[in-house]
Amino acid sequence: MKNTRRCQYLTFLTGILLWLPMVCGAQSLPQVPQEVVKVEFEAAGHRYSVEIVPEKSAELDQAEEGSGYCGNPEASPELHAECDLILKDGNTELSRLSLGECSFVHHQNKWVVRGFSPLSLLKKKEDYPIISFSQYAGCNGNIQYFFWVEAQKDQLALKPLNFMSYPCMVENNQLWVSPAEDSVQLTLSPQTHRYEIWINGYDNAGLFSFVAQYGEISPGHWHCIGFYTEAAGTYEAIKKKIFKK
C-alpha cells in the first residue's frame, strides 16, 4: 500500500513539474539587461568602453517557431527597445547618442544579431577605433551603423560616420551589408597609406553580390572609391577577381 501511494505521489509531482513551464512560460525569459553589449579598447593611456544601453521601456517576448524571421531561426527570446550608444572612460560617461529602436536575440546567454555581437570595433593604429553596430534588415542583409570618436579639446564625442556616394547606402552613416560577422573590414592601403572600409553585401533588387570600397578622405568622412559586382555570385568570387587570388 505504501509503495502504491508513493508511486501515485511521484506521478502527481511529475505532472506538476511538466505543467509549470507551460503555465509560467514567461519566467523562462531572461531579464532586461542594464547593457545589451559592451566592448573595450585602450587609447592615450586610458581604458575606454562602448556600450549599448536599453531604455526603461524595453520589451521582452518569446518568438514563435516557424515565424519566418530569418534573424531568429531558433525562436529564442527577443529584446526590443529604444537604445543609446554610450562612450565611457572607466565609469565616467563621456558621450551618448540615440540609436532609436533596436532588436536583439538571446543566444547562449548573450544578446546577438544573426548569432554574433551587434557591436564591434574597427581598430586603427594610434587612433580611436571606428564603432560598428549591426541590426537585422532582411533575410539577405543587415544594416550596419558606423560611428567615430572625435576629440573636442579635452572631451571625446561620438559622431556618426559620413559615407559619400550612392552604393549600398541606407543613410549617411548606414550601409547595407551581408548578414555575416566578417562582412565589414578595415584595412590600411599600402598604396595611399590611408584607411579603407570594405563592405560585403547582396543587392536584393539586382540579384547580385557586391563589394564596396570606401576610403577615408578626412576625419569622419569616407568616399566610395570602388564598387565590384558579381551577378548571382558570391563574395569569394568577387574577392578572387579583385585581388587576383
Image (tube, helix red, strand yellow):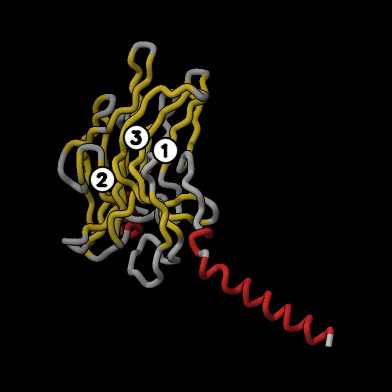
Name the residue that disc number 2 marks.
175
Sequence order check, earlier mark of 2 and 3 = 2
| Circle 3 or circle 1, nearest the eye | 1
Q: Can the viewer see residue 184? A: no
- Amino acid type, residue under disc 2 in the picture: Leu
Q: Is residue 207 above or below residue 88?
A: below
| Circle 1 or circle 2, nearest the eye | 1
- Amino acid type, residue under disc 1 in the picture: Val
Name the residue that disc number 1 marks.
53
Q: Residue at x 35, y 40 (%)?
A: 83
- With 217 as the anchor, is 70 left or right in this view? right
Crowding at mark 1 (Cα within 10 Å: few <14, some 14-19, many 20+): many
- Amino acid type, residue under disc 3 in the picture: Ser
Question: Dot 2: what SS?
Answer: strand
Name the residue that disc number 3 marks.
189
Rendering coords of residue 145 (x, y %) = 30, 41
